[in-house]
Every structure is written in structure tokens, then in C-alpha cells.
Amino acid sequence: TLPQSTERALKWLSQSGVRHQEADSVAFGGVNQGYNWQEHSYPFIYTEITGYAVSMFVCAHQWTGDARYMAWAKEAMGYLSRYQEQADEATVGSIIHGLTLPGLQPMPQYYSFDLAMCLQGVMDLHRAAPSDEVQQVGRKIGDWLVNRMQQTDGSFLAMYDRQSGAWQHPGENFFDDFGCLHGKHSIGLLKLAEASGDSRYRDAALKVSDWVLRLQNPDGSIRSSITQPQIVSHPHCYATEGLLYTHYVTRDERYLQAALRAGEWLLQAQNSDGSINIEYGKPWWRMGRRVVEKIVPKRVTDATSQAARIWLLLYYLKQDKRFLQAAQRAGTHLEKMQCTSSDDPNMVGAFFFWPGHPIMFTWATMFAAHALYALANVDRADGYTHLITELF
């Protein structure tokens, strides 16, 4: 069953201006970061989100059998392969951060996380429609991640900037070096290891999974990085997703127990309306103008959607109704966050990041569409295997 919320989101993703449909454009197949409904514009074409779109369209094809979704997945894949670096020694195998709009100028930064999410999309497409060419794109991405960005302790550098030549980017943002979000890299690396038979990628996945365990607090929360104590819910969920997938492949109970603690922490963090806040534990004196969020915290669609999927996976594994009930509460909140009608057709089907936020982020819409599909089909046969292999 394709719920109406997911159907609307897929129509927005595939048929609105968020996806580049001009076959003669260098942007063809690329997907924008989101839609700014206040300015009626799209910020930029985002490589990471194009990788998610490959996975989303592969899922939609599996759910519906509609061949158009597979065609759109291949168009997004074409964008990624078109911008994969071939010659530059530092970046070979990597893909630019994105293209500017409207100028379509390359953004010469190369993010580990972007590439790991693209790797997932590439391998999801390869699983659905096996291709040596597609697998080669995946292997080049995997080699860049493992050889260039992963450190000996399993952690990852965040980004290489070709303009400045800088590899290291320490900082207080969750997406800087050595962030817990890199724990999600294990998914694409493990899928690549299975498809290629190359154990290097599996070894790299286990190293980053072991590394992220060290960022988990006794209460189950996962610190945003090795230097930052606050919990940012979005990367907390990314790390948890990685641990769940690593457990699925290895059956190592350490990863499941860590994911269970992380899921339990999300239970106590959930608001009464079903939502999850953007972050927790940040000292008020470091919040600047955002200190008001201590009183009225921002309740975000992406982490709420991720939490719903995590809880469903834990429900399948443990049959603990608390996880199912929390996921259902999250789903109720998410349905309220979708734009179902507007004078602006480019809004319809997308999800607000939080009420009033000017940009309807594409990844938040995809995560919500997937979570609501999973909730509507929670009783499907072998739901755990379906959901864990669909996870993106």
C-alpha cells in the first residue's frame, strides 16, 4: 500500500522543479537541496541528496512496479557518474559537493558523508539492476573514502577543499572532522563489500562502527563528534542507522545493543506531539541568537522521520510495543508537516523542515515519505529485512 502522503512526496520529488529533467543540461538527473517557498527558488544542486534520490526511486520501484521510478533512479545515477573525478590524484573517485544555481558552476568541495550516501544509492541501484559500470562507480567512491578520508582509528575526515587544498576541518559543527554521522558510512561500504567481494570495504565499515561506539554516552545518546558534547538528533540517528545495518550484516550483538540504547534515548527525547528536537544538551551560552530554542526547541522533520524508522527496526527485532507506538506518534506528527495544498505547486507534497522554515529540504521529504510508507506497511511479511535493506 502506497499511502497518500508518500505518493504526494514522490510526485513532488519526481515531477516538480526539485529534480532536473532537462536531458540536454549538465544538471540532468541532479536533485536540488530543497525548495525555498518564500523566495520561490532552489538553493543548489546537492550531490548527497542526489545519492538519496537514487535509493528513494529504487524503493519506489520496488513498492509500485512503476518503471518510471527506475528510469529516474538511473538519471540520478547518471548525474553522479558524470561528476565523478577521474584524473585529479587527490579526488579521483570522488564527486563534487554540487552545482550552483542558476549558474551551474561546480562546487569544488568533496565531502566524505556526501560520497558515502552516494555509495549507498549506487549500490542500491546495482542490487536492483546489476551493472558492472555502476559497480565500478561504487568501487571508485569506496576507494576514495577508504584510502583518502578514513583514519587509522576508523574515523573520517569530513571534507577535502580543492580551492584551498585543505584536508582537515576541525570545528564545532556536527559535519566537521570526526563526526558521529560518519558512522552511517558502514551501510554503503558493507553493500559494496558484498557486491564486489572485496573485504577492504567490510573492514573499513567495521572500523568506523567500532569507532562510533566510543562516542556513545551511558544514557544511549551519541555525541555529535569527538570534541563536541552536545547531541544533535539528526547525526545521532545517522550513527544509529549505521549500527543497525552493521548488526544486520555481521549479527554482532555489540552493535545491536548500542542501537537499542540509542533508540531508548530517542524514546525519552520524543516530544508529546511525536516530534524530535533538533539538538539536546548544548549550553545556552553557546547558542547565541538561538538561545530561545532552550524554551521553544525546533522540532525537525528529518530526525523525527529517522527516529520512526529506527524504532520500527527495533520493534521488529525486539517486539517491544513502545518502539511501535513511538513510531506511530512520529508518523502522526509527520503527516501534519506535509504541504498538501498551496497556490504554489512547487510546495505540494514536500514536508516543512519545521513550521515556518523557509526551505523544504529534499532529504527531509524523502525520509518522511519512507517512514510513512514503512508505518503504513508495518505488517508486511519479513518487514525487518525489507526496511533494513531499504534504509537510506
Image: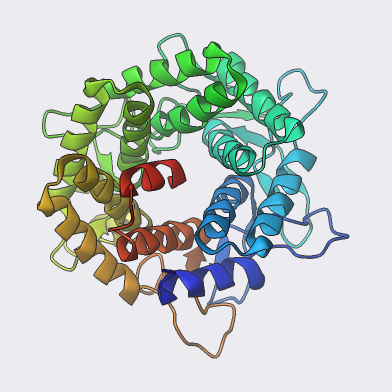
89 sits left or right of 312 in the view: right
**Residue that appears at 20% across and 65% down:** 329
**Residue that appears at 52% across and 29% down:** 191
Q: Residue 283, can we see it?
A: no
Position in image of residue 224 (x %, y %): 32, 35
Task: Examine the image and state in which quarter residue 241 appears.
Answer: top left
Q: Is residue 237 or residue 325 the one in the foreground?
A: 325
Q: Residue 109, can we see it?
A: yes
361 sits left or right of 166 in the view: left
**Residue that appears at 68% across and 30% down:** 135
Task: Examine the image and state in which quarter residue 196 appears.
Answer: top right
233 sits left or right of 115 in the view: left
Q: Residue furthest bottom?
A: 343
Give the vertical position of 32 relative to 120 (above or below). below
Position in image of residue 164 (x %, y %): 68, 28
Give the vertical position of 17 relative to 319 (above or below). below
**Residue that appears at 22% across and 63% down:** 328
Q: How many marks?
A: 0
